[in-house]
Protein backbone atom coordinates (compact mmCIF):
# COMPACT_ATOMS: atom_id res chain seq x y z
CA UNK A 1 0.00 0.00 0.00
CA UNK A 2 2.78 2.31 1.04
CA UNK A 3 4.78 1.38 -2.04
CA UNK A 4 1.92 2.11 -4.44
CA UNK A 5 1.32 5.48 -2.82
CA UNK A 6 4.96 6.29 -3.37
CA UNK A 7 4.77 5.31 -7.03
CA UNK A 8 1.63 7.39 -7.56
CA UNK A 9 3.10 10.32 -5.73
CA UNK A 10 6.14 10.12 -7.93
CA UNK A 11 4.09 9.75 -11.16
CA UNK A 12 1.48 12.46 -10.61
CA UNK A 13 3.54 15.61 -11.21
CA UNK A 14 4.97 14.21 -14.42
CA UNK A 15 1.50 13.20 -15.70
CA UNK A 16 0.04 16.59 -14.77
CA UNK A 17 2.90 18.32 -16.52
CA UNK A 18 2.45 16.24 -19.69
CA UNK A 19 -1.30 16.83 -19.74
CA UNK A 20 -0.88 20.54 -19.13
CA UNK A 21 1.66 20.88 -21.91
CA UNK A 22 -0.55 18.85 -24.26
CA UNK A 23 -3.43 21.17 -23.45
CA UNK A 24 -1.25 24.19 -24.06
CA UNK A 25 -0.15 22.84 -27.42
CA UNK A 26 -3.75 22.06 -28.41
CA UNK A 27 -4.86 25.54 -27.34
CA UNK A 28 -2.07 27.15 -29.35
CA UNK A 29 -2.94 25.02 -32.36
CA UNK A 30 -6.58 25.92 -32.11
CA UNK A 31 -5.80 29.58 -31.66
CA UNK A 32 -3.77 29.48 -34.88
CA UNK A 33 -6.66 27.78 -36.68
CA UNK A 34 -9.08 30.49 -35.50
CA UNK A 35 -6.77 33.28 -36.63
CA UNK A 36 -6.27 31.65 -40.02
CA UNK A 37 -9.80 30.57 -40.89
CA UNK A 38 -12.09 33.05 -39.12
CA UNK A 39 -12.25 35.52 -42.04
CA UNK A 40 -13.20 32.81 -44.51
CA UNK A 41 -15.89 31.26 -42.28
CA UNK A 42 -17.31 34.72 -41.56
CA UNK A 43 -17.27 35.59 -45.28
CA UNK A 44 -19.13 32.42 -46.24
CA UNK A 45 -21.74 33.01 -43.53
CA UNK A 46 -22.07 36.66 -44.51
CA UNK A 47 -22.65 35.84 -48.16
CA UNK A 48 -25.18 33.15 -47.17
CA UNK A 49 -27.12 35.06 -44.51
CA UNK A 50 -26.42 38.64 -45.67
CA UNK A 51 -26.58 39.67 -42.00
CA UNK A 52 -23.26 40.82 -40.45
CA UNK A 53 -24.47 40.45 -36.84
CA UNK A 54 -25.87 36.99 -37.43
CA UNK A 55 -22.73 35.96 -39.32
CA UNK A 56 -20.60 37.13 -36.40
CA UNK A 57 -22.71 35.11 -33.96
CA UNK A 58 -22.69 32.00 -36.13
CA UNK A 59 -18.93 32.31 -36.67
CA UNK A 60 -18.42 32.39 -32.90
CA UNK A 61 -20.71 29.40 -32.46
CA UNK A 62 -18.82 27.58 -35.18
CA UNK A 63 -15.47 28.03 -33.42
CA UNK A 64 -16.99 27.21 -30.05
CA UNK A 65 -18.31 23.94 -31.45
CA UNK A 66 -14.98 23.29 -33.15
CA UNK A 67 -13.13 23.96 -29.88
CA UNK A 68 -15.33 21.50 -28.01
CA UNK A 69 -14.69 18.83 -30.63
CA UNK A 70 -11.09 19.74 -31.41
CA UNK A 71 -9.81 16.58 -29.72
CA UNK A 72 -11.98 14.43 -31.99
CA UNK A 73 -10.80 16.17 -35.17
CA UNK A 74 -8.65 13.50 -36.80
CA UNK A 75 -7.34 15.57 -39.65
CA UNK A 76 -8.89 13.36 -42.34
CA UNK A 77 -9.99 16.51 -44.11
CA UNK A 78 -8.39 19.94 -43.79
CA UNK A 79 -9.33 22.06 -40.79
CA UNK A 80 -10.93 24.51 -43.20
CA UNK A 81 -13.24 21.87 -44.69
CA UNK A 82 -14.15 20.64 -41.21
CA UNK A 83 -14.91 24.18 -40.01
CA UNK A 84 -16.91 24.89 -43.16
CA UNK A 85 -18.98 21.80 -42.55
CA UNK A 86 -19.79 23.01 -39.03
CA UNK A 87 -20.65 26.46 -40.40
CA UNK A 88 -22.98 25.02 -43.06
CA UNK A 89 -24.78 22.92 -40.44
CA UNK A 90 -25.11 25.88 -38.09
CA UNK A 91 -26.53 28.01 -40.88
CA UNK A 92 -29.02 25.24 -41.79
CA UNK A 93 -30.06 24.85 -38.13
CA UNK A 94 -30.52 28.59 -37.85
CA UNK A 95 -32.93 28.76 -40.80
CA UNK A 96 -34.75 25.64 -39.68
CA UNK A 97 -35.28 27.12 -36.20
CA UNK A 98 -36.37 30.40 -37.73
CA UNK A 99 -38.99 28.62 -39.84
CA UNK A 100 -40.27 26.80 -36.75
CA UNK A 101 -40.39 30.05 -34.79
CA UNK A 102 -42.61 31.73 -37.38
CA UNK A 103 -44.61 33.35 -34.58
CA UNK A 104 -41.54 35.17 -33.40
CA UNK A 105 -40.95 38.70 -34.61
CA UNK A 106 -38.29 38.41 -37.26
CA UNK A 107 -35.63 40.88 -36.35
CA UNK A 108 -33.04 40.47 -39.00
CA UNK A 109 -30.46 42.84 -40.29
CA UNK A 110 -30.17 40.99 -43.55
CA UNK A 111 -29.54 43.14 -46.54
CA UNK A 112 -29.83 42.28 -50.17
CA UNK A 113 -26.71 40.71 -51.65
CA UNK A 114 -26.71 43.31 -54.40
CA UNK A 115 -25.53 45.84 -51.79
CA UNK A 116 -22.25 43.98 -52.04
CA UNK A 117 -21.75 45.71 -55.38
CA UNK A 118 -21.12 48.94 -53.43
CA UNK A 119 -17.95 47.31 -52.11
CA UNK A 120 -16.52 46.44 -55.50
CA UNK A 121 -12.91 47.67 -55.56
CA UNK A 122 -12.39 50.18 -58.32
CA UNK A 123 -9.02 48.75 -59.38
CA UNK A 124 -7.71 50.46 -62.47
CA UNK A 125 -11.06 50.83 -64.18
CA UNK A 126 -12.54 53.93 -65.64
CA UNK A 127 -15.73 55.31 -64.09
CA UNK A 128 -17.80 53.87 -66.90
CA UNK A 129 -16.21 50.44 -66.57
CA UNK A 130 -16.77 50.58 -62.84
CA UNK A 131 -20.47 51.36 -63.28
CA UNK A 132 -20.83 48.48 -65.70
CA UNK A 133 -19.03 46.12 -63.34
CA UNK A 134 -21.27 47.20 -60.44
CA UNK A 135 -24.35 46.56 -62.52
CA UNK A 136 -23.05 43.10 -63.41
CA UNK A 137 -22.37 42.34 -59.75
CA UNK A 138 -25.88 43.47 -58.85
CA UNK A 139 -27.34 41.12 -61.45
CA UNK A 140 -25.23 38.18 -60.28
CA UNK A 141 -26.18 38.89 -56.65
CA UNK A 142 -29.88 38.89 -57.47
CA UNK A 143 -29.50 35.67 -59.42
CA UNK A 144 -27.61 34.03 -56.52
CA UNK A 145 -30.30 35.12 -54.06
CA UNK A 146 -32.85 33.35 -56.24
CA UNK A 147 -31.03 30.00 -56.09
CA UNK A 148 -32.15 27.14 -53.86
CA UNK A 149 -30.37 26.83 -50.50
CA UNK A 150 -28.13 23.99 -51.66
CA UNK A 151 -27.32 25.53 -55.04
CA UNK A 152 -26.48 28.80 -53.31
CA UNK A 153 -24.16 27.08 -50.83
CA UNK A 154 -22.35 25.18 -53.56
CA UNK A 155 -22.09 28.27 -55.79
CA UNK A 156 -20.68 30.43 -52.97
CA UNK A 157 -18.20 27.78 -51.85
CA UNK A 158 -16.96 27.32 -55.40
CA UNK A 159 -16.83 30.84 -56.75
CA UNK A 160 -16.48 33.03 -53.64
CA UNK A 161 -14.45 30.72 -51.41
CA UNK A 162 -12.72 29.09 -54.40
CA UNK A 163 -12.86 25.61 -52.93
CA UNK A 164 -12.15 22.48 -54.92
CA UNK A 165 -15.12 20.27 -55.82
CA UNK A 166 -13.80 17.49 -53.57
CA UNK A 167 -13.54 19.93 -50.65
CA UNK A 168 -17.08 21.19 -51.28
CA UNK A 169 -18.27 17.57 -51.34
CA UNK A 170 -16.64 16.93 -47.96
CA UNK A 171 -17.92 20.17 -46.46
CA UNK A 172 -21.50 19.66 -47.61
CA UNK A 173 -21.59 15.89 -47.14
CA UNK A 174 -22.64 15.39 -50.77
CA UNK A 175 -21.12 13.27 -53.51
CA UNK A 176 -18.78 15.03 -55.86
CA UNK A 177 -21.16 14.18 -58.71
CA UNK A 178 -24.08 15.78 -56.85
CA UNK A 179 -21.98 18.87 -56.18
CA UNK A 180 -21.17 19.13 -59.88
CA UNK A 181 -24.86 18.77 -60.77
CA UNK A 182 -25.91 21.48 -58.29
CA UNK A 183 -23.15 23.75 -59.47
CA UNK A 184 -24.03 23.27 -63.10
CA UNK A 185 -27.72 24.03 -62.40
CA UNK A 186 -26.75 27.07 -60.34
CA UNK A 187 -24.52 28.44 -63.11
CA UNK A 188 -27.25 27.78 -65.67
CA UNK A 189 -29.78 29.68 -63.57
CA UNK A 190 -27.40 32.60 -63.02
CA UNK A 191 -26.68 32.69 -66.74
CA UNK A 192 -30.41 32.59 -67.47
CA UNK A 193 -31.06 35.44 -65.03
CA UNK A 194 -28.37 37.49 -66.66
CA UNK A 195 -30.26 37.14 -69.90
CA UNK A 196 -28.11 34.35 -71.28
CA UNK A 197 -25.87 36.91 -72.83
CA UNK A 198 -22.93 36.52 -70.51
CA UNK B 1 -7.06 29.06 -59.56
CA UNK B 2 -8.24 32.59 -58.71
CA UNK B 3 -10.10 34.69 -61.22
CA UNK B 4 -8.26 37.83 -60.31
CA UNK B 5 -6.22 39.04 -57.43
CA UNK B 6 -7.48 41.85 -55.21
CA UNK B 7 -6.04 44.58 -57.38
CA UNK B 8 -8.18 43.33 -60.24
CA UNK B 9 -5.31 41.88 -62.24
CA UNK B 10 -6.10 38.85 -64.38
CA UNK B 11 -4.48 35.62 -63.22
CA UNK B 12 -4.71 31.91 -64.00
CA UNK B 13 -8.44 31.39 -64.45
CA UNK B 14 -8.65 28.45 -66.84
CA UNK B 15 -10.71 26.19 -64.55
CA UNK B 16 -13.34 28.79 -63.70
CA UNK B 17 -13.49 30.19 -67.22
CA UNK B 18 -14.24 26.69 -68.49
CA UNK B 19 -17.07 26.33 -66.01
CA UNK B 20 -18.51 29.81 -66.33
CA UNK B 21 -17.79 30.79 -69.90
CA UNK B 22 -18.87 34.40 -70.42
CA UNK B 23 -19.98 34.69 -66.78
CA UNK B 24 -16.41 34.48 -65.49
CA UNK B 25 -15.80 38.22 -65.29
CA UNK B 26 -19.15 39.01 -63.63
CA UNK B 27 -18.71 36.23 -61.06
CA UNK B 28 -15.15 37.38 -60.42
CA UNK B 29 -16.39 40.89 -59.68
CA UNK B 30 -19.09 39.42 -57.46
CA UNK B 31 -16.40 37.53 -55.54
CA UNK B 32 -14.27 40.65 -55.12
CA UNK B 33 -17.28 42.58 -53.81
CA UNK B 34 -18.13 39.89 -51.26
CA UNK B 35 -14.50 39.77 -50.09
CA UNK B 36 -14.37 43.55 -49.68
CA UNK B 37 -17.74 43.63 -47.89
CA UNK B 38 -16.66 40.82 -45.56
CA UNK B 39 -13.34 42.49 -44.75
CA UNK B 40 -15.17 45.72 -43.94
CA UNK B 41 -17.81 43.96 -41.84
CA UNK B 42 -15.19 42.01 -39.94
CA UNK B 43 -13.23 45.09 -39.00
CA UNK B 44 -16.22 47.26 -38.10
CA UNK B 45 -16.86 48.16 -34.46
CA UNK B 46 -19.02 45.60 -32.67
CA UNK B 47 -22.68 46.36 -31.94
CA UNK B 48 -22.75 44.63 -28.58
CA UNK B 49 -25.05 47.18 -26.95
CA UNK B 50 -27.54 46.98 -29.78
CA UNK B 51 -27.58 43.20 -29.68
CA UNK B 52 -27.83 43.29 -25.89
CA UNK B 53 -30.75 45.69 -26.02
CA UNK B 54 -32.53 43.57 -28.60
CA UNK B 55 -32.04 40.50 -26.46
CA UNK B 56 -33.31 42.30 -23.35
CA UNK B 57 -36.32 43.61 -25.26
CA UNK B 58 -37.04 40.15 -26.64
CA UNK B 59 -36.74 38.65 -23.16
CA UNK B 60 -39.01 41.32 -21.67
CA UNK B 61 -41.67 40.74 -24.34
CA UNK B 62 -41.40 37.00 -23.87
CA UNK B 63 -41.72 37.22 -20.09
CA UNK B 64 -44.62 39.68 -20.31
CA UNK B 65 -46.51 37.43 -22.70
CA UNK B 66 -45.72 34.44 -20.52
CA UNK B 67 -46.94 36.24 -17.37
CA UNK B 68 -50.13 37.38 -19.12
CA UNK B 69 -50.81 33.82 -20.27
CA UNK B 70 -50.13 32.35 -16.82
CA UNK B 71 -52.24 35.04 -15.09
CA UNK B 72 -55.06 34.48 -17.60
CA UNK B 73 -54.90 30.74 -17.10
CA UNK B 74 -54.86 31.08 -13.31
CA UNK B 75 -57.70 33.61 -13.13
CA UNK B 76 -59.75 31.49 -15.55
CA UNK B 77 -59.14 28.46 -13.38
CA UNK B 78 -60.02 30.32 -10.19
CA UNK B 79 -63.19 31.76 -11.77
CA UNK B 80 -64.23 28.31 -12.96
CA UNK B 81 -63.55 26.84 -9.51
CA UNK B 82 -65.60 29.56 -7.74
CA UNK B 83 -68.39 29.18 -10.27
CA UNK B 84 -68.49 25.42 -9.64
CA UNK B 85 -68.53 26.02 -5.88
CA UNK B 86 -71.42 28.46 -6.23
CA UNK B 87 -73.38 25.98 -8.36
CA UNK B 88 -72.69 23.22 -5.84
CA UNK B 89 -73.89 25.48 -3.00
CA UNK B 90 -77.11 26.35 -4.87
CA UNK B 91 -77.71 22.65 -5.63
CA UNK B 92 -77.16 21.76 -1.96
CA UNK B 93 -79.59 24.45 -0.79
CA UNK B 94 -82.16 23.23 -3.31
CA UNK B 95 -81.72 19.63 -2.16
CA UNK B 96 -82.18 20.62 1.50
CA UNK B 97 -85.29 22.64 0.60
CA UNK B 98 -86.65 19.67 -1.38
CA UNK B 99 -85.99 17.33 1.53
CA UNK B 100 -87.72 19.77 3.90
CA UNK B 101 -90.76 19.98 1.61
CA UNK B 102 -90.91 16.19 1.28
CA UNK B 103 -90.68 15.81 5.06
CA UNK B 104 -93.39 18.44 5.56
CA UNK B 105 -95.64 16.72 3.04
CA UNK B 106 -95.06 13.39 4.74
CA UNK B 107 -95.89 14.89 8.13
CA UNK B 108 -99.08 16.44 6.72
CA UNK B 109 -100.10 13.09 5.26
CA UNK B 110 -99.42 11.35 8.55
CA UNK B 111 -101.51 13.92 10.44
CA UNK B 112 -104.34 13.59 7.94
CA UNK B 113 -104.25 9.80 8.21
CA UNK B 114 -104.26 10.00 11.98
CA UNK B 115 -107.21 12.39 11.98
CA UNK B 116 -109.09 10.19 9.51
CA UNK B 117 -108.44 7.14 11.67
CA UNK B 118 -109.56 8.97 14.76
CA UNK B 119 -112.69 10.14 12.92
CA UNK B 120 -113.53 6.64 11.75
CA UNK B 121 -112.88 5.17 15.19
CA UNK B 122 -114.99 7.83 16.80
CA UNK B 123 -117.79 7.46 14.23
CA UNK B 124 -117.97 3.70 14.69
CA UNK B 125 -118.42 3.92 18.44
CA UNK B 126 -122.08 4.82 19.02
CA UNK B 127 -123.16 5.36 22.61
CA UNK B 128 -125.28 2.48 24.04
CA UNK B 129 -128.23 4.72 24.77
CA UNK B 130 -128.49 5.61 21.11
CA UNK B 131 -128.25 2.05 19.72
CA UNK B 132 -132.02 1.60 19.10
CA UNK B 133 -131.99 4.85 17.14
CA UNK B 134 -129.00 3.66 15.15
CA UNK B 135 -130.77 0.42 14.29
CA UNK B 136 -133.73 2.40 13.04
CA UNK B 137 -131.48 4.54 10.89
CA UNK B 138 -129.96 1.40 9.41
CA UNK B 139 -133.42 -0.02 8.60
CA UNK B 140 -134.47 3.23 6.91
CA UNK B 141 -131.37 3.10 4.77
CA UNK B 142 -132.15 -0.52 3.64
CA UNK B 143 -135.74 0.44 2.72
Image: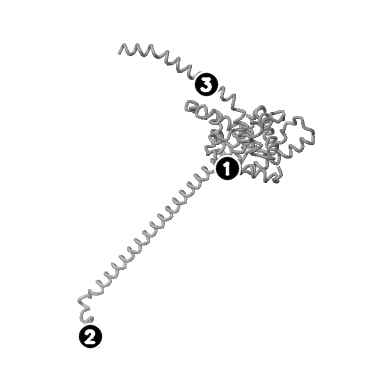
Task: Identify the residue under disc 3.
Answer: A27
Label 2 crowd bin: few (<14), some (14–19), many (20+), radius 10 Å: few
| Colour style of the rendered protein structure | one colour
Which quadrant of the figure contains the C terminus of chain A? Answer: top right
- Give the camera-side residue of A72 and B135: A72
Q: Chain of mark 1?
A: A
| Element on which disc 2 rests | helix
Q: Tell me: B93 left or right of A88.
A: left
Relative to A62, does residue B115 appear above or below in the rendering? below
**Which of the two marks, 3 or 2, is nearer to us in this view?**
3
**Residue B39 visible in the shown view:** yes
Q: Chain of mark 3?
A: A
Relative to B22, does residue B85 appear above or below in the rendering? below
| Element on which disc 1 rests | helix
Q: Tell me: B135 left or right of A101.
A: left
- Give the camera-side residue of A164 and A146: A164
Relative to A38, does residue B84 appear above or below in the rendering? below
Task: Identify the residue under disc 2.
Answer: B139
Q: Earlier in the sequence, mark 3 or mark 1?
A: 3
Task: Identify the residue under disc 1.
Answer: A181
Tell me how far mark 3 sits from mark 2, CA to CA: 136 Å
Say which quarter of the image contains residue A19: top left
Which quadrant of the figure contains the N terminus of chain A? Answer: top left
In the rendering, at what x and y percent does residue A54 appear?
A: 61, 34
Same chain for mark 3 and mark 1? The answer is: yes
Query: What residue lies at 62% left-to-right and 28% top-to-bottom?
Result: A39
Tell me how far mark 3 sits from mark 1, CA to CA: 40 Å
**Which of the two marks, 1 or 2, is nearer to us in this view?**
1
Amino acid sequence: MLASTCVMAAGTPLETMTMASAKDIAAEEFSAVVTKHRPQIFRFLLSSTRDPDLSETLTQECFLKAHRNWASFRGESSAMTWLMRIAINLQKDHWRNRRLQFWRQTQTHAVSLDEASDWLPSGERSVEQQMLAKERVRQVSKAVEGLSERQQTVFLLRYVEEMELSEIARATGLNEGTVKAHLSRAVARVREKLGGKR
Amino acid sequence: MSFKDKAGEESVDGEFTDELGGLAEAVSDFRLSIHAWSDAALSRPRTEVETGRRRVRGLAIGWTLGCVLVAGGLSGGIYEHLHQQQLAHIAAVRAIEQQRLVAQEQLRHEEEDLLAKVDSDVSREVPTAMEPLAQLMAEDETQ
